[in-house]
Amino acid sequence: MIEKRDFYINGEWVAPSAANDCEVIDPSTEAPCAVITLGAKADTDAAVAAAKAALPGWMATPPAERIALVKKLIEVIEARAEDLAQAMSIEMGAPIDMARQQQVTAGTWHLNNFLLSTENFKFDQPLGDHAPNDRIIFEAVGVCALITPWNWPINQITLKFGAAAIAGCTMVLKPSEQSPLNAMVFAELVHEAGFPAGVFNLVNGDGMGVGSQLTTHPDVDMVSFTGSTGAGIAITKVAADSLKHVHLELGGKGANILFDDADETAVKRGVRHMMNNTGQSCNAPSRMLVQKGIYDKVVAEAAAVAASIEVAPASAEGAHIGPVVNEAQWTKIQGLIQAGIDEGATLIAGGTGRPDGLDKGFFVKPTIFADVNNQMTVAREEIFGPVMVIIPFETEEEAIQIANDTPYGLTNYVQTADSDRANRLARALRSGMVEMNGQARAEGSPFGGMKMSGSGREGGLYGLMDFLEVKAVSGWT
Ligand code: NAD
């Protein structure tokens, strides 16, 4: 059993102010794998005070030096990548090879993108040729609370850390209580990279404890939150009392629209994308919208692809999906699958219960429903598990209407050989991101959502801007 009770505050690991142990459960075995402490208010206060004290020095550090430390951090992450992967694998159930090849590398990819996107950024620049005495200074927002979920933990931490660090902000990270171990390795790496004391601090805790202490703390200037839409709304309300900047990356219910002329790999790609990370991705293409001409063929192929996906404990090497994160999530997913059956959707793969041979662990069968209409519970709720729905449509207008008929607006996907149509859909779909024909977003492309999927963007220059105040100066000589 791993015991990791201390917090990283002001450049050192310090003992918690009070004992409040919390077990971390390995979702592949249902057995405790670690014990951590949930922080008390005194711990949160100490971390915020350290961040506040470090702020003037860090803001005054030339951007090139801040960027150089981020570059160093990438090197130390790469050297300890296996520790990060192992931690994620036991605490949130990412299959070990997937943790190595996708989870950890997403983190270094984001940090590299910040380097690429910000190397020519001028933190201080003239307003324009018409106003020689006016300047714009981009200045750190201040002390930032970074509150992150468990599903892509290093990905989410680095997206916030990289932007905040380069902007000159100081930080207190509260990782998910479900995935504290990889965040603690990350804190060790920040230390090893040589960031000054107080720039980055970590306190473990849950949402109601450390989470709410941070979002109501008078010395926190900004909350950057990734997690559920419900928690995002609660945070926005309490942060309003002190008018903090609030940056939200929330849930999703993405549509993946397959027209009759979709390429032949579109179905396999869509199902595999949906099931990756056991369906626990905010940008999962969870609603496959299929045009009538290819509907029957797509349903048959999707069922076959789902049936071919192996489910296994996270420690098993190779390509498979692992368990979902915890018992509450397992139970919720079972209820939603049952709702799909009860409401008359056609179950074409998976279903309730555990996959054969996996009696222990929070394993879910890769599940697909066909003949779904967009008002069914399975089409409306963010399930956050390996469950996809297939919805038929006839016309382009109908596809757009169905895709946009959701409170969420994070990512939509379009599969068609007709580039005019693809471009029309890119404009018509109300989401922060539209991915066409399997083309992944390039380096520096902003990540974030519209509607109930959040506000603000992460990654590259757009992500940096969210951690900067824009100061207008006139009379500059
Ligand atoms: P969650 O909202 O339960 O928790 C996320 C984090 O917020 C955790 O650290 C938690 O302790 C903390 N928290 C919860 N309530 C809080 C409160 N009232 N005040 C302060 N902190 C609070 O989400 P989760 O279950 O960890 O993650 C899954 C959710 O995250 C899904 O809805 C998913 O779509 C979303 N998500 C969004 C993105 C994105 O970029 N849009 C990325 C990944 C996950």
Image (cartoon, rainbow, N blue to C red):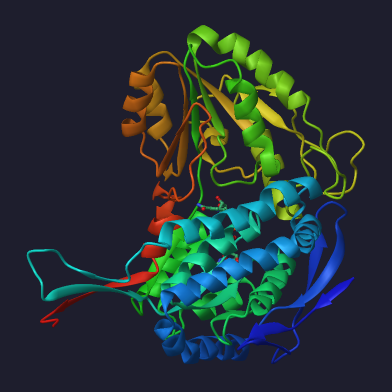
Q: Quadrant of residue 7?
A: bottom right
Using residue 226 as the reference point, say whether residue 387 is left or right of it.
Answer: right
For this orientation, the residue located farthest to the left is: 130
Using residue 106 as the reference point, say whether residue 428 is left or right of it.
Answer: left
Q: Can residue 227 be seen here?
A: no
Camera-side residue of 414 and 108: 108
Camera-side residue of 226 and 335: 226
Residue at image position (68%, 39%) is 276
Q: Position of residue 477 (x, y in %)?
A: 13, 83
28 relative to 289, above or below = below
130 relative to 371, above or below = below
Q: Can residue 282 be seen here?
A: yes
Residue at image position (86%, 72%) is 2
Using residue 97 as the reference point, say whether residue 133 is left or right of it.
Answer: left
The N terminus appears in which quarter of the rendering? bottom right
Q: Position of residue 238 (x, y in %)?
A: 42, 73
440 relative to 88, above or below = above
13 relative to 267, above or below = below
Residue at image position (59%, 15%) is 264
Q: Quadrant of residue 208?
A: bottom right
Q: Position of residue 265 (x, y in %)?
A: 61, 20
Q: Position of residue 407 (x, y in %)?
A: 42, 43
**How many tags in the picture?**
0
Quadrant of picture, ligand 1: bottom right
Camera-side residue of 123 and 398: 123
Residue at image position (68%, 73%) is 189
